[in-house]
Structure formats: C-alpha cells, structure tokens
Image: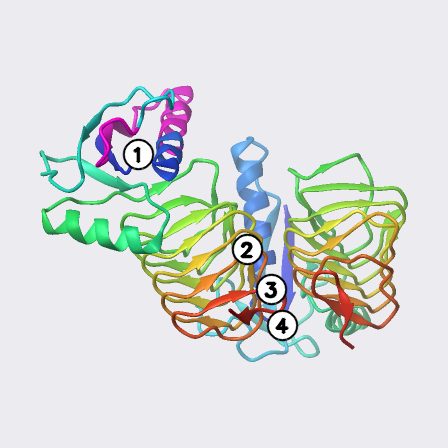
Amino acid sequence: MTDVILVCEDVFGLEILDLLRRINAYLARNDAGSRYRILGYVSDAPAPFGGMPAPAERLGDLASHPMRRDARYVLGIKDPASKRAAVAMILSRGGRFETVCSPWMICRPMTFGEGAVMDAYSVTISVSVGDYVTVCDSMLAVEGSIGAYSTVMRFANVICDGVGEEAFIGSCAFVPHGVTVGDRARVLDGSIVVKNVKPGTTVSGNPARKIS
Amino acid sequence: MQDLIIVCAGGFGLEAAAFIEKSLFYAAQKGEEAPFRILGFLDDNPDALEGTGVDYPVLGSISDWQPIGNERYVLGAASPSTKEKLSAMLKARGCRFETIIAPWCIILPETSFGEGCIISAYRICSGVKLGDFVNVAGSMLCPGAEIGDFSTTTGFTVVENARIGKRVFIGSHAVVTDGVVVGDDAQISAGTIVREDVRSGATVFGCPAREI
C-alpha cells in the first residue's frame, strides 16, 4: 500500500482521484488488495472542486503544507504549464511523485516517466512516455515519444509521429499518422489534425486550423 | 425479484433489454438470485418485435395499458420529447419506473440518479447528478456534470463539469467543456464542441459550436 497525496488545481483533480479509487476497486475485485491510501489533496486554489463536497482532506497549499516524505504525490493537473510549476514546487521541497498506471490498460510491458498518470485505453509507443505525462481514456499509438508534461484528454486518438513537451491534446481530438505535435502546442477538444502542429501554436476545428 | 415491462420495442427498448439480460447473466455467474424478470414489451405496434429475434411478448399498446401489480417499467425511448410524453402518460395511470444500470458501467461514489434512467455509460465520475429519465449511452461524465430530466447523451460524448438542462439531446463525439450551461430543449449535434453556453431550444453544430 502506497500513501498518496493528490496535487490539483481544479475539478480535473477529482478525475484522477476517481482513477486511484477505481484502481483500488479493480484490485480488490481481483483479490489483490488495495494499492493506494489517499491521505488528502494539496492545491493552491481555495476551492478546487467548486461547490462539490471535497472527497479527501485538504492538507494545505503546495508551498506551505506539511511535507510527507514517506508519501508519494500524484499529479491531478491537466494544464502542462501548471503541471511544470507544481512539480518544481513539490520537488524543491523534497517530495517525490508516484507513477500511476491503470492495471486494465492494454499495453506491452513498458516503463513510463516519473510521475506519469496513465489511464489510456491502449498504448503502443515505440520510444517513450516522458515524465509527468497525463493520459485519460484515449488511444495512443505513437511512432516516437510523448514529451514531458504533456496531457492527452479523454477519447483522443493519437497515432502520430511524436508529441513534444508540454503539449496538450483535448478530448475527442484525432492526431493521425505522419504528423507531429510540437512543444507547448495545444490541440483543442474535437480537433481533427491534418498537418504538423508547430511548437507553441493552438489549433482547433475540422480540419484543425491555427487559431493562435 | 423485480418484474419489468419495457415501454417501446424500438432500438433503444431492445438495448435496454440487453442490459437487463446481461445483469441477469452476471448474477447467474456469481450464483446470485436474479434481480429482474422481463415480462415483455409495450408498443402501439403489436408486431414491433417481429424479425428482431427477441422472444418476449408485446403485452399491449402504450396508449391503453393499465398497470397490473408490482411490476416496474423501463422507458426504452431515446428521444427526449417521447420520454416526457410517455412517462407522464404512464405515471398518471400509476406506473412506476425502474432505473437500469448496465453491469459494465464504471460509476464512482457520490453520484445521484433520478427514476427511470437507463445508464450504459463509459464512466460516471464522482459528484455527477442525473435527473429523471436520463439516458446515458457510452459517454464519459466528468466530475461535477449535471444532466436534467429527459436528456439523452450518446456514444463517445464527454460532458465535463457542465450543467445540461432538461430534454437536451447530445449527439455522438460531442464535447461539452468545463463551466458551460446548456439550456432546456437544446440539441447538440454529433461532433460538436461546446465551449460557450447554449441557449434554450437552440440547435448547435460544429467546432466551436454555432447555432443553426
């Protein structure tokens, strides 16, 4: 059993908390006990879950909460830049991140980067998944790597030639063979990408066009 | 054991029957008592089940049906206006409706359902609130999503932390993003990416959503 603390900034954190609870339930159903004990959450937002009752105890904000060196931190943030800032803060205070990988995910034995949160439908990646990558319920078949701090949201289908660092791919987006997504690029929800997404740009629509 | 009668022998009624049969199959596998028994269908067309391979009877027509005892009803319609009409008609005669949850659904704690829902969601995260007679098929409802009475969501839909009104229809592969409010009677076409509020009665389409 691993003691974990969720790091979050908004309601997306609940999705990752749900993932931890689902992994526990899945293992319990298969008589494999429980994997995570959730100690609580840390957040710089005063009410990250809006009006919803907090499902775990608030331990404080990132910079000042009492550090738990025996526990591992789990990233529950979707925005790549916020993730980078949160990771830097926790690491500077001596915290360590847990790599979370759902046991039902279809993938060959492979290692994921430190602090990655992987709940893909399936993963076939020929190179690597970087540190602090977040993947929710999507299909990944990348001939290349997924760079550190990148996020792939629900029902996205990413079968491209590589995703850079700090990239964001929204829900239901499709990124086909033959294209790459550059560093810090954003592919908004539902975009159908047809050509390379340049570093730092935001694309949207079908076919996806640059909007900034 | 609860006796069930399925209202409407169309495609969605047959799907509801399949969910119920699967629950019975799982219960039998675990050696548990069967939770339900399907008595048959109600449909205004007495030959509605012909050629479908389903061997339940059509017990009578919806328009002149009277309840028989302790049976519960399952509303096998997907169209919001049909659901509202039929549920009002049958409830006025004293029929009571059962909520059916397909056994493979992942439903986290702290979710609430109204009566007469049919749920075969991909996943319903914590803090989701559903009204009465809501159909959720193959969708992902993220933490905090609220869906009003008689609304329907279809396959590969993502509803983030958004508020959906009553009698709303959400087509396949649509995404309703964080914080959006969708008014009553709105229609969200397939593949639509909703990033701004949708007014009541509007039909929206495209990425980003535009009114048509």
Chain ID for label 4?
A: A
Amino acid, disc 2: Ala
- Residue A114 in view, yes or no: yes
Q: Are marks 3 and 4 in contact (CB under 8 Å)?
A: no
Residue that numbered label 4 is attached to: A9
Q: Are marks 2 and 1 in contact (CB under 8 Å)?
A: no
Amino acid, disc 1: Ala
Q: Nearer the viewer, residue A169 or B193?
A: B193
For residue B41: magenta? yes
> In what element is the residue under mark 4?
loop
Respond whether the residues carrying marks 1 and 3 are from the same subunit. yes
Residue at 85 percent across and 72 percent down: it is A200
Residue at 87 percent across and 57 percent down: it is A180
Respond whether the residues carrying marks 3 and 4 are from the same subunit. no
Give the residues drawn in magenta, as a range: B19-48
In the image, B101: left or right of A21?
left
Residue that numbered label 3 is attached to: B206
Q: CA distance from mark 2 to mark 4?
A: 31 Å
Residue that numbered label 1 is attached to: B9
For residue B63: magenta? no
> In what element is the residue under mark 3?
loop
Amino acid, disc 4: Glu
Q: Nearer the viewer, residue B60 or B47?
A: B47
Q: Earlier in the sequence, mark 2 or mark 1?
A: 1
Q: What x and y, as percent, mark residue B187?
A: 44, 62
Amino acid, disc 3: Gly
In the image, A125: left or right of B204?
right
Which is more foreground, mark 1 or mark 4?
Answer: 1
Q: CA distance from mark 1 to mark 3?
A: 33 Å
Q: CA distance from mark 2 to mark 3?
A: 8 Å
Residue that numbered label 2 is attached to: B190
